[in-house]
Image (cartoon, rainbow, N blue to C red):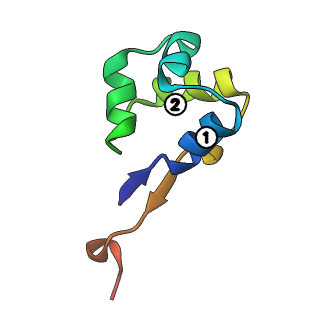
Amino acid sequence: MEVSYKKLWKILIDRDMKKKDLQAKAGISWASVTKLSKGETVSMEVLMKVCKTLNCDIGDIVELIPTEKDVIK
């Protein structure tokens, strides 16, 4: 499975927020923001802080995308 944070970036655009605004308001490290930007996994704690800051559910910011090796044949 791959992780996609496209929904998160869309929310930030819709709310006229920059990544640095999210980082400051959510109280997460810049390293976590970088991981999010690269589509890497982050801790559930980071995701919960982002959701609390944006007043949304985890499904509103993260999407799991199956890869070919994840498909059962």
**Observer-nearest of 66 and 13:** 13
Q: Which residue is mark 1?
A: 58
User: How many numbered discs, if any?
Assistant: 2
Q: Residue at x 45, y 15 (%)?
A: 28
Q: Residue type at mark 1?
A: Ile
Question: Which quarter of the rendering shows the N terminus?
Answer: bottom left
Q: Residues within 10 Å of mark 1 (few under 14, many from 20)?
A: some
Q: As displayed, is residue 56 above or below residue 30?
A: below
Instruction: Please state if 28 lies on the left or on the right of 17 as rendered.
Output: left
Residue placed most toward the observer, 9 or 46? 9
Residue at point 69%, 39% (across, down): 14
Q: Residue furthest bottom?
A: 73
**Residue 42 x, y percent position in the rendering:** 37, 33
Position of residue 36 measured from the top left corner of the image (x, y, whole percent)? 39, 36
In the rendered image, residue 66, in percent from the top left (x then y), is placed at 39, 68
SS type, badge 1: helix
Q: Is residue 17 above or below residue 36?
A: above
Residue furthest toward the front?
16
* Residue identified by numbered label 2: 47
Is 43 left, or right, of 31 in this rendering?
right
- The answer to whether mark 1 and mark 2 are in CB contact below 8 A is yes
Callout 2: few (<14), some (14-19), or many (20+) C-alpha neighbours within 10 Å? many
Q: Amino acid at mark 2?
A: Leu
x, y percent for residue 59: 62, 48
In this orientation, which residue lies closer to the viewer: 56 or 18?
18
Q: Secondary structure at mark 2?
A: helix
Residue shown at 48% from the left, 18% from the top: 20
What is the quadrant of residue 50 in the picture? top right
- Give how far apart the Cα atoms at labels 1 and 2 are: 7 Å
| Label 1 or label 2, whichever comes before in sequence order | 2
Quadrant of the image containing the C terminus: bottom left
Residue at x 61% of width, y 40% of height: 58
